């Protein structure tokens, strides 16, 4: 995602502000590892998270760990201040599904447990929505298998990506032929 969009997210939602610290937090180091088309989706997700905290009357204690595209969908990994387990997901299952963990802190009261459950459900909802939003432009999209890797794209962006791939292939063929011709000259 373009830096200016990440900065807007950080300005509007302090938990999304990047401090560029080198503390092992992937989000702090790399930012949003997805294209610009999911900016509005992320913005809406962050607004819902903020609303959940506001409605619960609790301070925001979410820590964004990583934001990326994986298996053609958005992944929004997070933890909470003071929780014992920084790992919340495994996404390497063959069909693209993942396993999510909800770390529990025994000192959490029922209100905090409900808040964290609501946040988990909201994150999953937006990750699911990303299956239908073009990662490049934000228009309606669908998961595409025609590329070397899965991506969620609209028809127009898919066409542009396929054209780029064909252009690269043609250029590689020209380069190979050029090398063959040079070898023949020797």
Image (tube, helix red, strand yellow):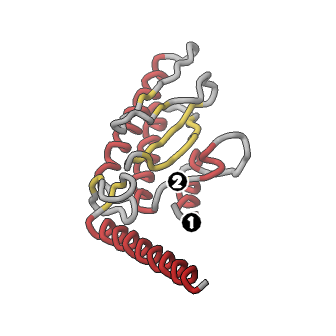
Residue 25 in percent (x, y) is at 65, 41
At x 42%, y 27%, the residue is 117
Residue that carries the numbered disc 2 in the rendered image = 33
Name which of mark 1 and mark 2 comes first in the sequence: 1
| View extreme (bottom): residue | 185
At x 28%, y 58%, the residue is 141
Position of 166 relative to 152 (above/below): below
Front position among marks 1 and 2: 2
Measure the C-alpha gap from mark 1 to mark 2.
Answer: 14 Å
Q: Quadrant of residue 84?
A: top right
Residue 126 in percent (x, y) is at 37, 44
At x 59%, y 24%, the residue is 85
Query: In this view of the protein, which residue sits in the foreground, 15 or 158?
Result: 158
Residue 42 in percent (x, y) is at 44, 51
Residue 92 in percent (x, y) is at 44, 35
At x 30%, y 63%, the residue is 139
Q: Is residue 55 left or right of residue 5?
A: left
- The label shown at residue 4 is 1
Q: How many badges with numbers are in the image? A: 2
Query: In this view of the protein, which residue sits in the foreground, 178 or 68?
Result: 178
Secondary structure beneath label 2 = strand
- Crowding at mark 1 (Cα within 10 Å: few <14, some 14-19, many 20+): few
Q: Is residue 159 left or right of residue 16?
A: left
């Amino acid at each position: 995602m373009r830096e200016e969009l990440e900065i807007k997210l950080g300005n509007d939602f302090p938990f999304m502000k990047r401090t560029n610290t080198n503390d092992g937090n992937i989000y702090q180091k790399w930012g949003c590892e997805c294209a610009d088309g999911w900016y509005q989706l992320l913005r809406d997700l962050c607004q819902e998270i903020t609303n959940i905290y506001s409605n619960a009357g609790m301070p925001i204690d979410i820590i964004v760990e990583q934001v990326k595209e994986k298996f053609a969908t958005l992944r929004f990994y997070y933890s909470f201040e003071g929780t014992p387990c920084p790992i919340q997901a495994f996404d390497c299952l063959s069909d693209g599904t993942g396993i999510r963990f909800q770390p529990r802190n025994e000192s959490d009261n029922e209100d905090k447990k409900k808040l964290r459950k609501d946040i988990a459900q909201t994150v999953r909802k937006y990750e699911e929505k990303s299956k239908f939003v073009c990662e490049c432009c934000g228009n309606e999209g669908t998961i595409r298998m025609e590329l070397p890797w899965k991506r969620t794209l609209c028809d127009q962006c898919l066409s542009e990506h396929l054209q780029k791939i064909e252009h690269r292939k043609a250029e590689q063929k020209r380069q190979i032929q050029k090398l063959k011709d040079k070898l023949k000259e020797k």
